[in-house]
């Protein structure tokens, strides 16, 4: 598998970005530019990634396409279409967003996230984005979230069926779906269930860790690999059993090069112990 993440640090050119990428040891990265970038500059970054032996695995959207504020929703939908078209143009297989929420915070937890109207709007919105762009190489995907659809593998499968578009893929973030004590305590079987059900559609995977705090009532929080309770010597063989050998697996949500390096070292050591090749 291609172990990677997001390049951190300061850069002002593709060459400086490439130096940081090489230093990171990443074999897969999130896209450092978006659809607004001049195309030659974008191509220069993609060339820099190739020269460093890395693949650009994800183009992010990260906008609330379900916003209850019409102006925000229209702008988010426009950006989602532009990002999907950019991913398709540049040959990035995964364009990822969250489904969106029905409240003021773009990724917030609201009761209406689970309403029938919200579900129908998710289906309509995903179809509309894909149909407007008609990508051939890129897939529009939704990162699972703890408090919005899809929040589990069965919910993701239902959404894939209901959307009914060939270029709708799956994004795998199993930590975001570890949203109950049962899933936390039985994490590895749950992760195996996620990959077993969704593997044919998975275009990219996020690697994180999770901690359940035991004072009543349950609190489950995200942390970096090696700082939580997940045993990556057991998790990585699950991923390897279900995904192609060159599948991208990306560390995320770390704020510094040092934090990414520590997480990379932890996952790489677990991979070596489990006999899983990573690069």
Image (spheres, rainbow, N blue to C red):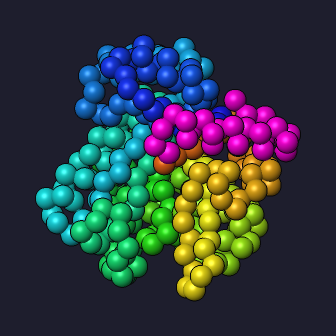
Q: Position of residue 151 (x, y in %)?
A: 52, 70
Q: Residue at x 53, y 53 (%)?
A: 171
In the image: residue 278, left or right of residue 81: right
**Main SS class of the magenta portion in the image:** helix
In the image: residue 210, left or right of residue 57: right
Q: Position of residue 157 (x, y in %)?
A: 57, 66
Q: Residue at x 60, y 35 (%)?
A: 261
Q: Residue at x 13, y 59 (%)?
A: 71
Q: Position of residue 106 (x, y in %)?
A: 30, 62
**Residue 136 picture quarter:** top left
Residue 268 seen anywhere in this rendered image of the structure: yes
Q: Nearer the viewer, residue 141 or 55?
A: 55
Figure label count? 0
Q: Is residue 161 magenta?
A: no
Query: Magenta segment, which residues?
Result: 254-279
In the displayed image of the protein, which residue is found farthest to the left? 71
Q: Nearer the viewer, residue 136 or 42?
A: 42
Q: Position of residue 54 (x, y in %)?
A: 57, 25
The C terminus appears in which quarter of the rendering? top right
Q: Is residue 277 magenta?
A: yes
Residue 121 seen anywhere in this rendered image of the structure: no
In the image: residue 90, left or right of residue 272: left
Task: Identify whether 7 is placed above or below 254.
Answer: above
Task: Identify whether 72 is placed above or below 88.
Answer: below
Q: Residue at x 70, y 43 (%)?
A: 267
């Amino acid at each position: 598998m291609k172990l990677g993440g997001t390049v951190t640090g300061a850069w002002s050119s593709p060459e400086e970005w490439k130096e940081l990428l090489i230093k990171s040891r990443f074999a897969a990265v999130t896209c450092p530019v978006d659809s607004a970038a001049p195309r030659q500059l974008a191509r220069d970054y993609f060339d820099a990634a190739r020269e460093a032996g890395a693949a650009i695995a994800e183009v992010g959207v990260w906008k609330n396409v379900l916003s209850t504020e019409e102006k925000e929703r229209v702008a988010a939908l426009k950006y989602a279409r532009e990002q999907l078209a950019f991913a398709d143009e540049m040959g990035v297989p995964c364009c990822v967003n969250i489904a969106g929420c029905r409240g003021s915070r773009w990724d917030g937890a609201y009761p209406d996230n689970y309403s029938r109207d919200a579900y129908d709007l998710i289906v309509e919105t995903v179809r509309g984005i894909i149909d407007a762009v008609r990508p051939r190489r890129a897939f529009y995907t939704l990162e699972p979230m703890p408090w919005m659809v899809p929040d589990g593998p069965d919910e993701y499968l239902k959404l894939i069926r209901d959307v009914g578009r060939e270029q709708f893929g799956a994004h795998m973030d199993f930590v975001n779906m570890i949203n109950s004590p049962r899933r936390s305590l039985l994490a590895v079987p749950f992760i195996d269930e996620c990959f077993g059900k969704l593997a044919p559609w998975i275009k990219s995977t996020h690697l994180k860790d999770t901690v359940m705090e035991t004072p009543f009532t349950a609190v489950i929080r995200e942390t970096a690999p090696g700082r939580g309770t997940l045993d990556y010597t057991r998790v990585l063989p699950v991923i390897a059993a279900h995904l192609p050998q060159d599948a991208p697996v990306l560390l995320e949500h770390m704020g510094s090069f040092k934090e990414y390096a520590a997480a990379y070292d932890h996952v790489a050591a677990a991979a070596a112990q489990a006999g899983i090749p990573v690069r």
